[in-house]
Every structure is written in structure tokens, then in C-alpha cells.
Image (cartoon, rainbow, N blue to C red):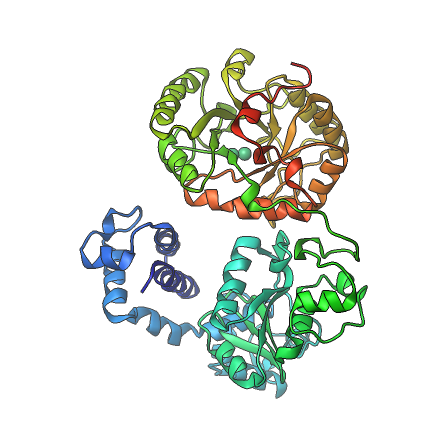
Amino acid sequence: MDNPQIADRLEAFASLLELADANPYTTRAYRRAAETIRGAAAPVAELVRSGRVRELRGIGPGIEARLRELVETGEIAELAELEREVAPDLVGLGRYLGLGAKRSVELARALGVRTADELREAAAAGRLRTAPGIGPKTEARLVEALSRETEPRPRRGLLLNRAWELVGGVAAALDGEAAGDVRRWRDSCELLAVVCAATEPRSVLARFAALPQIVAVVEEGERRAVGVTVEGVPIEVVVAAPERFGTAQFRATGAPAYVAALEPLPDAPDEQALFRQLGVPWCPPELREEPFRDDPPALLGEDDIRGDLHCHTTWSDGRVSVEEMGRAARERGYDYLAICDHTPAVGAVPGLTPTDVRRQAEEIEAANESLAPFRVLRGIECDILADGRLDLPDDVLAELEWVQASVHGGQRMPRPEMTKRVEEALRNPYVRCLSHPTGRYINRRPENSLDLERVFEIALEEGVAVEVNGLPDRLDLRGEHVRDALRAGVEIVCSTDAHSIRGLANMTLSVATARRGWATAAQVVNTRPLQSILTRRRARG
Ligand SMILES: [Zn+2]
Ligand SMILES: [Zn+2]
């Protein structure tokens, strides 16, 4: 059993515990342990066998016992028992229909049904209204949803990392290809799809229905099916005849408006052939939003990135030391990494005072001695105070090699004040880059009320770059805004805002988001060599 498999089982266990109303503390502990195991460098099965697994963060005796059982027997007995008890397929179907986990289980009990199919039968027979709490309105809604012919969508979009995990996992298990929103790297994914090639679709559809990720199949046709996960997220699988695979993948990738403009589509075995037959240059999926048939620009690639300019360490809320982050960045093939810990105004987590900044400098110097010629840069993620001043004095900022400025608190400010606040900060001669400019958290917090057009104007005047933050719940700026910034002549920085070694891998998400904004390598600051970063002078110096 490899680390991802072990992590998957622990996560499944956590989900089932949650459905069974277990102590939320326990559920969280299992989720955290799963995350640790996914990111662990050593094979966890071996650590379990040699009795060393508790050296990993967050693994106590209880979880160790489960891990031992899993590694020795290939299963966790209580997990299998929970699966029988809480009927995750019903819960998945219920969530897909808009019912909470508890209500799904209650409904199933009241109707005496055990599986998703039985629930559908009960609905068809008009029995839903016999369950307590289900009025005619709810019944009508559920029946409609169960028979819906519109495209299935989750209740809310999935974060890109989670969507890739799900779609990529299903695609790999079925020897298919990812399609839908993830393939276009949308920041929040609603249409999740996998496309497979097979002359005989039945065995592929059967394998799909049997996947551990899929708890219930809600629609099934001759060459397609829609399954839902335990969270109620629908995912579609399309099985195309091999000679039509390219056409099917193209359609399933979308976006609908882009596809519609190229209709009618010929049958093609792969996308390259499809584009050739259409007489249109191949278009990267990230650009397939609006109708487009011209030559695409040579988009930025992850290989173009020479360093990461925004990450945290144990000096603020990061998990590892300066040297460990530097080493990990060097292993990724970078030439440099800027350490940008927080300043005190951030509040919830520790922030660096001027004294701390200078103490950290010593640690950075030591790291540079051991990592040379790789370079750890002295940076900061400096809070922008409510009045636009920065949270550190200019003489401290002047010592630093890379200054990010960020709005964290007081984000509900009216638009004119917020714009003024950011403008003030950009006027500071030491600021090099504006972090997560809109401040949104996908699905959780809307964008700050901010005049971005004005911000780009000032950024251009002052020679400040804007960030494309790669945290999966930020992706800020998003693609459309990246495009606006670049059109305004402003340069961007692709950063991860990593708080752990694993976080450095979010560069993939940042780069994909920049690509959605049509970015080329020349427009991205951190595609350039170290010397150009160090000598990057502000317009007004
Ligand atoms: Zn921040
Ligand atoms: Zn940060």
C-alpha cells in the first residue's frame, strides 16, 4: 500500500465518522493524519511495520493502531462496518439532491431503503411523502432532481486541487483522460468529466460504477454515466468509440460557448486531428472560454519559472524552517526563493517585528551558506494598515530584497477607501508586489470592493507587480483579472504562498491561472534570473 492509498482510506474513514456523527475532533485528526501521510517522504507502510510511524506529525496511538490494521490486513474493520451502517451511497445521493447527510440517513430509515436504487424506486412509487418532514414541495423537488435531464452540477464548485484529485483519480483508474472544467483549470469546477476510448463501453461503465470514489450512479446511458461521490459531487464519464475520442474529449472539455462556435465537429481520434480537420490552430484548454480560432500566444509554462517569491516559515505560520523551505525550492530546480513571513498586524498568527526581521536575516544568511549558489531572499509579506501605511518602517523595508504588500484585516471597507488604501501602499518605494490583490476566498469570501483598473494604473506607474497567488482557495488574481493586468501593461508574479514544503507544488495552479489570463513567460517576473530580481528597480527609486 502506498502513501496516497493509505491517505485515501483514512480520509474515507474520516468522512464516514462524520456521517456517523462522531466527535469532530476525531474526524479532524484523521483528516490531518491523511494529509501528513500524503505529504510524507518515506513510505508510511514501512514506518508502521518498524514501529516508527508516530514520528510523523499528528499520528498518535489511536491512529497508529488503525494504520497497523490497515497495513497488516489491507482494511480497517470499523470502516467496513461504518460503510454498512451509514450507507454512504445514500448519503452521496442525498447530498447530490440537496439533503444534508443526517436527513438522508433519516429519510432512508423512514422509507426502509438501503441503496440509492431503492431510494429512486421509492421516489418513483410516490412514497417519499410518507417520510416525516417531506412535504409535497420537497418531494417534487427531489423527484425532479432524481430524473433531471439538465447537466448535473455540484451544489457549489469544487476547488481546483480537489477537483483534479477526483477527476485525475477516476481518469487514471479507467485509463481515460480528464476533461471538463479541470482541464481548463477553472478556479472553481462544476462540470467534472472523464473521457475514455473503447469500442465496447459496458465494461468501462461497470468499472466506473465500482470505483471507491463513486458511491452511487445517478444516470446511465449507453456510452455515458454520471456518478456521485460521498460528498454528493457528480462526475460524468463518457466512453467514446476510439475513432471519435478526440471529438468527445473536445466536447467534454468545453467551454460550451467555445465548442459551439466551432460546430459542426468532424469525428477525430484525437484533438490534434480534430483541430487539423477544422483548419484551426490547436488551442490550449486554458484559453477555451470564449469563441476563438486564431493562433494562440506562446503561453507561460511551469518550466519557465526560476523561483518562488512568496512563502512562509516557522517564523510566522509556516510549518518548516527557512533552510528546509530553501532546500525544497532548490530541489524543485529553482534558483531562488523569497521568504515572506507575516508582520504583526496580521493578527491571528505570529508576525515579525523589526527586531525579528533582523534576527531572521541571520538565519537566511546561514541557509544561503549551505545552499549556495541557490539563493534565499530576504522578503516580507507586509500588512497594509487601514490607512494605507505599511506595518514596518521604511528603514526595515529598505534592507529587504523582496517586499510583498497585503491587505488582510478590514476587508469590508467601501470601495473608495479600499482603493485609496491599496494605492497608498503601492506608492511606498520598497513595495515590489501586491499579494492576492482581491482578497477573495473561493466559495467563502467575496472579492474586496476595489477598483482594480485604478490599482493596475498605479502599479504600472510605480513598477509594482501583481501576484497570481497559487493557494487553491485563493487563485488571486484569477484568469480574467490577469488578462486585464497584462493588457494594462502590469507584470505579474506567479507565487505559491506556501506554508509547507508541499505547498510549493501549488506553482502548477498559479501558472495555470496565469495561462488562463493569456500570460507569456516574458510578462512574468519570476521567469527571470536572480540578478534581474535583485536589480529590479522601482520606476521612482
Ligand atoms: Zn496573505
Ligand atoms: Zn502569505
Question: Residue at the spot x=51%, y=36% of the render?
Answer: 308
Determine which quarter of the picture holds residue 292: bottom right
| Outermost residue, left side | 50
Q: From what the image shows, is residue 183 above or below residue 512?
A: below
> Which residue occupies the foreground of this view, 68 or 376?
376
Determine which quarter of the picture holds residue 71: bottom left
Q: Locate the C terminus by quadrant.
A: top right
User: Would residue 388 be found to the left or right of residue 106 on screen?
Assistant: right
User: Would residue 367 be found to the left or right of residue 253 on screen?
Assistant: left
Q: Is residue 472 visible?
A: no
| Outermost residue, top side | 395
Q: Position of residue 352 (x, y in %)?
A: 45, 23
Question: Residue at the spot x=44%, y=42% of the render?
Answer: 332
| Outermost residue, bottom side | 125
Q: Position of residue 491 (x, y in %)?
A: 67, 32
> Which residue occupies the foreground of this view, 412 or 396?
396
Determine which quarter of the picture holds residue 532: top right
Q: Is residue 302 visible?
A: yes
Q: Position of residue 383 (x, y in %)?
A: 56, 26
> Which residue occupies the foreground of this view, 184 or 537?
537
The total of numbered circles placed on residues is 0
Q: Position of residue 338 (x, y in %)?
A: 48, 29
User: Would residue 14 be found to the left or right of residue 468 on screen?
Assistant: left
Q: Locate the N terminus by quadrant.
A: bottom left
Q: From what the image shows, is residue 254 above or below residue 139?
A: above
> Which residue occupies the foreground of this view, 485 or 390?
485
Question: Residue at the spot x=57%, y=41% of the render?
Answer: 304
Q: From what the image shows, is residue 473 above or below residue 361?
A: below
Q: From what the image shows, is residue 252 above or below residue 54?
A: below
